Image: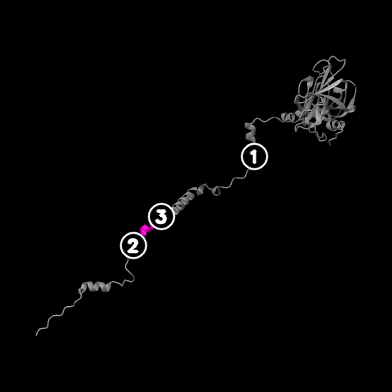
Amino acid sequence: MRRPALYSRSSHRAPDIDSASAAAAAPPVSGPCPSPEAPNARAHRWRRVLAHPALLWAAIALLAGALLWPAMPWRKPPARALTQNDIHAAVMHTLATRHLPSQVARAAAAVGPSVVRVEGTIPGQKRRRGSAEPGKGVGSGVVIIDDGTILTNLHVVQTAESITVAFADGTESPAGIVSIQPENDLAVLRAQKLPDDLQAATLRSSADLRPGEEVVAIGFPFGIGPSVSSGVVSGVRRGFRSPDGGQQMSNLIQFDAAANPGNSGGPLVTLDGQVVGIVTAILNPTPARTFLGIGFAVPIENAAAAAGQPPF
């Protein structure tokens, strides 16, 4: 009797020879199989990260820093040190492009506020040489103490019945003689009314004064002024005899800055604006009594001593 064929209840088919051999050749796979949707999830996660505001501002700041980095101060080369040639070039440029006041002008400006006009009323005299009007003699003076102490020449005020001084700002005041030093033709005046901002001149020793040094004379020649003239020191320790009274004077400064009647008592000033003498006389052997190039000044040491204020 024939036996019926037996069939398996499994739904799998037996592999064919080709499939079985391919499976045998493939290496074993460990772990779970990747999901086909994993790459899309990673891209979504990066988009969420990049869309965060803090990261966006950080990226902007980083970009701005990269752009500004070349302009940062620490990226600039250090400044070049100035050399003497740079300074010389700057000075020459200034001299070529700007008008600077002369040394004489600076000296006159420094002492100008201290120069005064001294006017004396001369009784019984119609007109004195250098006077501005009949019966008045005009000379010059310089304030040496801001309490109104003024140096001038004795011959300017010796015969005056009354004395008036006019300051640089136009203030006029009566003045009296405080002391005199006849051997040096000096007188010390004291004004009664003073400007609010009265400025005293700076005095300088004449001990180191040398021939050839530039000087400035300031005063009221023939009543005109204040007038400024300049020249040089012609000599020191000179002697002079007055043609009027025959008075012999010594240890004088000889200078060639123009001086005329009315300059007497005014200051002789160095280019640094400091007073080294008081103009006292001119030498002119002719009857004209005008300046021929030789003037004399009393050294400031003697002049200040007459005021009881030896400065050196």
- Magenta portion: prevailing SS class: helix
Q: Residue furthest left?
A: 1
Where is residue 252, by image quadrant?
A: top right
Residue 23's spot in the image, x, y percent? 26, 72
Task: Work out how far the residue at label 2 is from the one at label 1, CA to CA, in angstroms.
Answer: 75 Å
Residue type for callout 1:
Ile
Residue 293's spot in the image, x, y percent? 79, 23
Q: Which residue is mark 2?
A: 38
Task: Work out how far the residue at label 1 is from the one at label 3, CA to CA, in angstroms.
Answer: 59 Å
Residue at image location 72% in from the left, 30% down from the top: 106
Residue 17's spot in the image, x, y percent? 20, 74
Q: Is residue 195 magenta?
A: no
Mark 2 or mark 1, which has the lower sequence index?
A: 2
* Quarter containing the C terminus: top right
Residue type for callout 2:
Ala
Where is residue 8, by image quadrant?
A: bottom left
Q: Residue furthest bottom?
A: 1
User: Where are the magenta residues, as a range?
Assistant: 37-49
Q: Residues within 10 Å of mark 1 (few under 14, many from 20)?
A: few
Residue type for callout 3:
Leu
Q: Which residue is mark 3?
A: 50
Mark 3 and mark 2 in contact (Cβ < 8 Å)? no
Q: What is the secondary structure assignment of the residue under circle 2? A: helix
Q: Is residue 75 left or right of residue 54?
A: right
Q: Which residue is mark 1?
A: 87
Frontmost of labels 2 and 1 is: 2
